[in-house]
Amino acid sequence: MDKADVDAITRNLIQEAYDKMKEARPDVSLEKLEQALVADYNQQEALYALKCLNWWLKRIEDLDNAGDVSPYSRGNFLLSQWKSYYSFLDLVGDAFDRCQYAVKHFVYGLALRNFTCIFAGGGMRHDPDLLEQIGRCYKGMGNYEEALDYLKQAAGFKQNDAATIAVLADVYALLGATKAAKALFREAFAIAPQAIDLREMESELLLTLVKRVSDMGYTGAELQEWIPVYGALLGVFTVKRGLKFAELSRLKQQIFDLETELRGSPREKNILIPALLNKYFRLMDHYEGGDNGAALIKETQMKIKIIEPVIFERYMC
């Protein structure tokens, strides 16, 4: 058998493995991947997929061995493992997108079964955490319309939860509702940038911005704090709104606290400066079109000039 025939056989076996994974048949998926490696022991995608599937099967085995675990806890456990899985992928190296699509469909599908069996009982139909988890599962499986329905309900209860709002924004972006996505991303990153799991985001709208900021050399918490700053400066987070009195009071207090902390903790300035800029931009959004707005915006810009003159010179002169 020549190499072309072997390649065709292994490609078909790998695709069958992914199909069975999405059908929640990991046992058959393993068989197909092993058959692909028998045909070509050095088939890199089959090796990669086998590592990924076995990683999840070990977690599922641990969960099964834990004894009497409620469906809600099982679903939550599965979703809680994604951060560890992404760390594992960083070690594995080369990524194969269709493998990750199949893995996501498999894991989110398993979690969804647990959550929907609770939801069907009717006792937790208005629980915001359950609504959010169901929405995240549908999003992970690519069913964005269903995800939107559940995440909108969850966000109605969790209006100050940056992570929930960001996932909802991502779904809006994936559905092409750009205006709603921009508004919600701005809200989420105004609340708590570091609470947002960037690895969970899928929309080109946000991922392009993240790449642009990371290409500037920012990583980790610093990257997440700079995202809303450059989101505003680069014309991505452009949908703005005024603040209610209580929100404005809270924002001014947060600014005061950050200014005080920045004066006293120069070692943390790499995080404090973008966090403070983010708050300043949010304040200027509120001032736009308001009484004495131009003067108040100018005053805020002068504060920006003091703490980060490069940003002032590049974007505000």
Image (tube, helix red, strand yellow):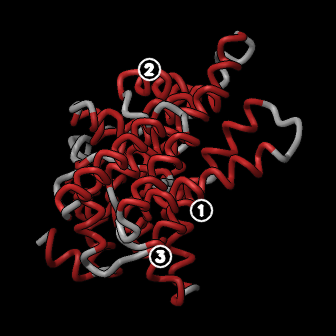
**Whole-percent x, y for residue 264 in the image:** 58, 85
* SS at badge 2: helix
When asked about the image quadrant of residue 70, the answer is top right
- The mark closer to the camera, 3 or 2, is 2
Q: Quick one: label 1 or label 3, which is nearer the N terminus?
A: 1
Residue 156, position as x, y percentages in the image: 52, 25
Residue at horizontal 36 percent and vertical 22 percent from the top: 145
Q: CA distance from mark 2 to mark 1?
A: 28 Å
Type of amino acid under label 1: Ser
Alpha-carbon distance for marks 3 and 2? 35 Å
* Quadrant position of the N terminus in the picture: bottom left
Q: Which residue is mark 1?
A: 84
Q: Which residue is mark 2?
A: 149
- Quick check: 211 left or right of 191? left
Amino acid type of disc 2? Asp
- Answer left or right for 16 relative to 272: left
Mark nearer the viewer, 1 or 3: 1
The residue depicted at 70 percent of the width and 10 percent of the height is 122
